[in-house]
Amino acid sequence: MNRMQQRAANYARVLNDVIEKMQSIQDDLNPKFEKIKTALAAGNLTAMKSSEYLKIQGDFQRGTDDYGKLAEKLHSVKAPAKLMGIHLSLVQALQNYTQACQNMIESMKDDRTVDEPAFQAAEEAQDLYLDKISKYLMKMGQLSQ
């Protein structure tokens, strides 16, 4: 395996690891997000036990911190030359997604109140950046063939 092939193989391995870990984090956090969103829609978030709410908040923060580490990991790996532009866009989208997650956490106050416009804006931003991440991954797949 020549150097360029090694770089491509390493990049593919790191990218796959990042994608799998993101999916795992999302699988863990989505039911918790749905619980908060449902309680907000019903107007009874304060009926949730404080300990449960604070645990969800903590889980969100840990997941967001993990997203940040994944963005750093992806940023630090050297992409094959033909993927460099799309790689940089992917890293930026993941960093923006991580910031949108942090914004959502910051909209959730410790007293079980939520800045709903900020929460909603963060959710919309997360959706936008996840769509971009998916689009960039599909484009990478096409360029790699």
Image: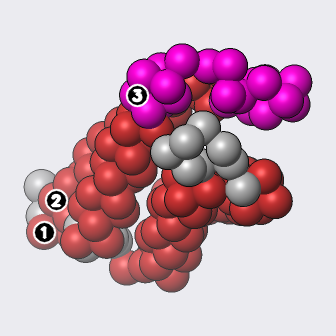
- What's the magenta bit mostly, secondary-structure-wise? helix
Q: CA distance from mark 1 to mark 2?
A: 5 Å
Residue under pointer 2: 6
Q: Quadrant of residue 80?
A: bottom left
Q: CA distance from mark 1 to mark 3?
A: 46 Å
| Residue at image location 44% in from the left, 33% down from the top | 54
| Residue at image location 62% in from the left, 56% down from the top | 107
| Residue at image location 31% in from the left, 71% down from the top | 75
Q: Is residue 53 magenta?
A: yes
Instruction: Residue type at mark 1: give it.
Output: Arg
Residue under pointer 3: 55
Residue 3: which numbered mark, if any? 1
**Front residue of 81 and 109:** 109
Residues rendered magenta in the picture: 36-56
Q: Earlier in the sequence, mark 2 or mark 3?
A: 2
Q: Secondary structure at mark 2?
A: helix
Is there a contact, CB below 8 Å, between mark 2 and mark 3?
A: no
Q: Secondary structure at mark 3?
A: helix
Instruction: Residue type at mark 3: give it.
Output: Lys
- Image height check: is 130 above or below 29? below
How many numbered marks, from 0 up? 3
Depth check, mark 1 against mark 3: the one in front is 3
**How far across and down, in percent of the image, does residue 88 sit?**
46, 78
Instruction: Residue type at mark 2: give it.
Output: Gln
**How far across and down, in percent of the image, does residue 60 sit?**
45, 40
Residue 142 in the figure: left or right of residue 15: right
Q: Quadrant of residue 44?
A: top right
**Front residue of 89 and 40:** 40
Is there a contact, CB below 8 Å, between mark 1 and mark 2?
A: yes
**How far across and down, in percent of the image, does residue 5 sit?**
22, 60
